[in-house]
Every structure is written in structure tokens, then in C-alpha cells.
Image (tube, rainbow, N blue to C red):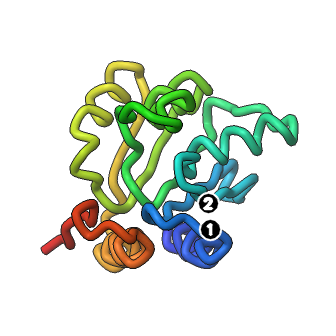
Amino acid sequence: MSEKEIFEHLFTIAPQSKDTDGVVTSCLVRDDEIIADAVSAGVEHAEYMLLQKLTAEGIEILPTDTIYVTLQPCDRRSAGPGELLGDCTTNVTKAGIKNVVYSATYPKSEKSLERFAGAGISVRQCDDMDIIKRSVELFNSTNQDQAKHIPYPN
């Protein structure tokens, strides 16, 4: 399964989310096959939902697995209900994921790449500009607070 096909799948599952804070989708890929996927649900970010699903289904994370996500994982949470769930960078690191691919950059996650690198996690941004722009559009079109919209890439 190509990276483009993986992200196409993530765009296909996006309507499952009713998140009004900006829809984000994620999946775990093993041997070029999607093992599990998840959508954001407000304070429950897509990575958190994916990790919960993997746990509930008894799916063990292998060192060769890769998590794909339409938005760069968050590196901190504000005080409130989401704070108790932890930030996505910490959750992914603690889960033992060793490979992360994201499409759109999240400007409020300036430390996630550094933190992943420090934990020995391979992280990179998808280089397909169409996928990046579609991920930004997905997030912004479903985020009711325009002040939280992320900028479109040039």
C-alpha cells in the first residue's frame, strides 16, 4: 500500500468524526497494511483514539509499525479535560511506536519533532503537497474556531 493510498484511506474515514475542533485521522500500518484506524473526537485526539483501539483489540505494537496521521502530533495540552489524556507526542512515545508520518504541520507543536528524535523515533512529514493541503482543509473546515485554523502551505 502506498503512502498516498494510506492518506486516501484517512480522508475516507474522516466523516466518521463529529469533532468540531478540527478533524484529524490516524492509522497504524504494518507490512504495508492498515491494521487499525481512528478519528478524533474532540479532546480525544486521533492518536489517542488509535492507541485506545489497539489496546482494546489486543493489538501489539511492533518496532516496524508506522503511525500515519493527518496532522503533526500535539506536544502539549492546555488545562482542561484533554490534559488528563496526555499529549499525543507523549502517548505515541510511551506506546512504543518507532515510526511516525504526518501530513500537515501543526504550528502549536514546535517541540514534537525534537521530542520524537530524542526518544529515537523516526518522524517525517509526507512530501505530497496535495495530501498536505487536503489535511489542512480537513482540519480547518471542521474547526469552528477560526482563530485555531492552521495556515495553508505555499
Q: CA distance from mark 2 to mark 1?
A: 6 Å
From what the image shows, is residue 121 above or below residue 17? above
Residue at the spot 54% in from the left edge and 54% down from the top edge: 42
Side of 1 relative to 24 (left or right): right
Residue type beneath disc 1? Ser
In which quadrant of the rendered view does residue 123 lie? top left
Determine which residue is flagged by label 1. 17
Which secondary structure lies at badge 2? strand
Report the quarter where the N terminus lies.
Answer: bottom right
Q: Position of residue 66 (x, y in %)?
A: 57, 45
Residue at the spot 78% in from the left edge and 32% down from the top edge: 60
Q: Nearer the viewer, residue 73 or 61?
A: 73
Residue type beneath disc 2? Val
Name the disc covering residue 153, or none.
none
Q: In terms of sequence position, does the residue under pointer 2 or pointer 1 come before the other?
A: 1
Determine which residue is flagged by label 2. 39
In which quadrant of the rendered view does residue 136 lie? bottom left
Side of 68 relative to 13 (left or right): left
Q: Position of residue 13 (x, y in %)?
A: 65, 72
Contact, mark 2 vs mark 1 (Cβ under 8 Å): yes
Counting other residues with Cα less than 10 Å from the Cα at mark 1, is it few (<14), some (14-19), or many (20 or more)? some
Q: Position of residue 113 (x, y in %)?
A: 29, 36
